[in-house]
């Protein structure tokens, strides 16, 4: 595996986790928003990621040194899915968006779950940054050996 391929895989992970952190931040920021884009309460969003090959199959086959035919994969954001669950129906007659009975629809964002997901995304981002820096340092050491 080349250093550039390792950097490509790590950078795809960085990009995916950055998108994930942005979506999680939006979920947290709108946890109490009663008016979303479509008119109702804000809809929680999730990032859908997929593993995609780093190169074409022929190139991966030629680069395979293990003999097992395993191909390297990187991460790609496929979709940002809107949650389809019904909003929370909460009694709050003081809210200006409350209906005639005093109930208001709030987003189904669970703040604790979003915070746990944010910590997970942050740790994955840090791990990818570390892997990218290690690949860069190995490439630099290889260049120094070649002098």
Image (tube, rainbow, N blue to C red):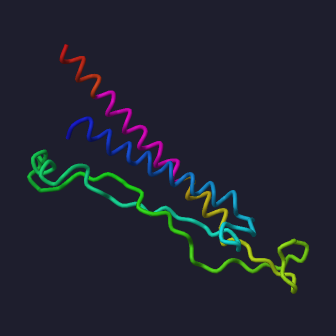
The image shows residue 109, relative to residue 51, as above or below, that is below
Q: Residue at x 47, y 42 (%)?
A: 126
Percent position of residue 18, x then y: 50, 48
Q: Is residue 9 magenta?
A: no
Q: Nearer the viewer, residue 116 or 139?
A: 139
Percent position of residue 102, x then y: 87, 82
Percent position of residue 106, x then y: 73, 73
Q: Main secondary structure of the magenta part?
A: helix
Q: Residue at x 33, y 30 (%)?
A: 136
Q: Which residues are magenta?
A: 120-138
The image shows residue 50, relative to residue 134, as above or below, that is below
The image shows a total of numbered marks equal to 0
Which residue is farthest right? 94
Q: Is residue 60 left or right of residue 34?
A: left
Q: Is residue 121 left or right of residue 136?
A: right
Percent position of residue 25, x then y: 62, 54
Q: Is residue 121 magenta?
A: yes
Q: Is the N terminus in the top left, top right, bottom left or bottom right quadrant?
A: top left
Q: Residue at x 89, y 77 (%)?
A: 93
The image shows residue 138, relative to residue 123, as above or below, that is above
Q: Is the C terminus in the top left, top right, bottom left or bottom right quadrant?
A: top left
Q: Quadrant of residue 57?
A: bottom left
């Amino acid at each position: 595996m080349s250093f550039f391929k390792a950097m490509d895989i790590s950078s795809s992970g960085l990009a995916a986790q950055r998108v994930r952190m942005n979506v999680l931040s939006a979920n947290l920021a709108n946890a109490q928003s009663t008016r979303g884009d479509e008119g109702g309460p804000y809809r929680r969003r999730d990032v859908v990621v997929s593993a995609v090959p780093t190169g074409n199959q022929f190139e991966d086959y030629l680069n395979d040194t293990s003999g097992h035919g395993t191909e390297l994969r990187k991460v790609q954001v496929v979709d940002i899915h809107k949650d389809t669950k019904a909003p929370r129906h909460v009694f709050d007659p003081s809210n200006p968006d409350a209906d005639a009975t005093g109930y208001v629809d709030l987003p189904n964002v669970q703040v604790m779950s979003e915070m746990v997901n944010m910590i997970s995304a942050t740790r994955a981002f840090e791990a990818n940054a570390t892997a990218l820096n290690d690949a860069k340092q190995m490439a630099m050491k290889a260049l120094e050996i070649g002098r």
